Image (cartoon, rainbow, N blue to C red):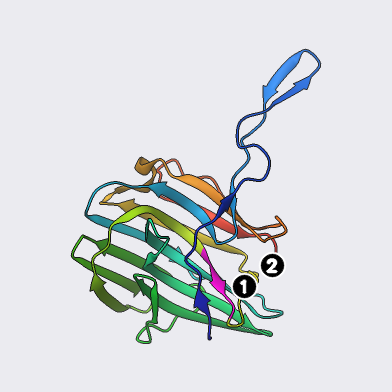
Amino acid sequence: MGLNRVSRRSLTVLGCAGAALVVTGATAMAAPPVTPTSTTEAGYTAAITGSTFLLKTQLTVPTLTCSGQAGIQSGAYLITGTSTSTGGGILVGCSAETPGYEAVALINGVRTVLTKITVAPGDAINVSVSVSATATTVAVIDTTKSTRQSEAGAGIAPTHLLVGDQAVGASGGGLLAVPNFGKVRFRTTTLNKVAFGSTTPSAVNMANSAKVVQITTGKLSATGAAFVLTFAHS
């Protein structure tokens, strides 16, 4: 689809992230904290320490409603201090009214389309990202069609992770609009074979440069392994 991934991570906070007080009569109630926003990502992120990581998740390919040029990349990523991503998932995009779906792997910021996997709406996709100081392996499995493909590369030293959506860069510069994907459901998310919630991840919404929220991140499940991303604005 001629789409280029954008790896730079830029968080901005809409309003105050701390809890404010809303006073009604004589009763003071704590307002819920404001979810931070990013122009390049949505989902759950967490700082990580160590030298060996195995990040896994499962997501369901959404059905796109297309009306123009748009794209987003959903998956699991380990990210270095220079904001270079290694991970995998699906690239979903629109060219005018035509939707497109691709399985992809990122190795140190270089994206490869996994042509052995034919992605379709409703497919269950498993993503596995294995990283050490000396080697990296990213595997994407379409469990609905029983197809699998992996890519390998040099090791990295990640400082944080993201499970969710990354923005996609337009060929002429800037970022593509977010396609109307409805919802993307993430399940069975683990880090080093332990439920993802053990990393105490933080939610982040995606917003455009005008601070209009494009993707909202739902609450992490009680098991700490599942959540939903919801389309809000292109």
Quarter of the view holding residue 62: bottom right
* Residue at the (53%, 45%) spot, across then down: 219
Q: What is the x, y in percent for residue 229?
A: 56, 57
Q: Which residue lies furthest to the front in this view?
A: 82
Q: Earlier in the sequence, mark 1 or mark 2?
A: 1
Q: Residue at x 46, y 80 (%)?
A: 102
Question: Magenta segment, principal secondary structure?
Answer: strand
Cβ atoms under marks 1 and 2 closer than 8 Å:
no
Cα–Cα gap, marks 1 and 2: 14 Å
Which residue is label 1 attached to? 174
Magenta residues, start to end: 166-170
Q: In this view, does 144 lie above or below 20?
A: below
Is 162 positioned to the left or the right of 55 in the image?
A: right
Above or below residue 138? Residue 52 is: above
Q: What residue type is labelled 1?
A: Gly
Across and down, in percent, residue 84 comes to 40, 64
For disc 2, the marked residue is 234
Left or right: where 127 falls relative to 175: left
> Observer-nearest residue: 168 or 24?
168
Q: Can residue 184 be seen in this view?
A: yes
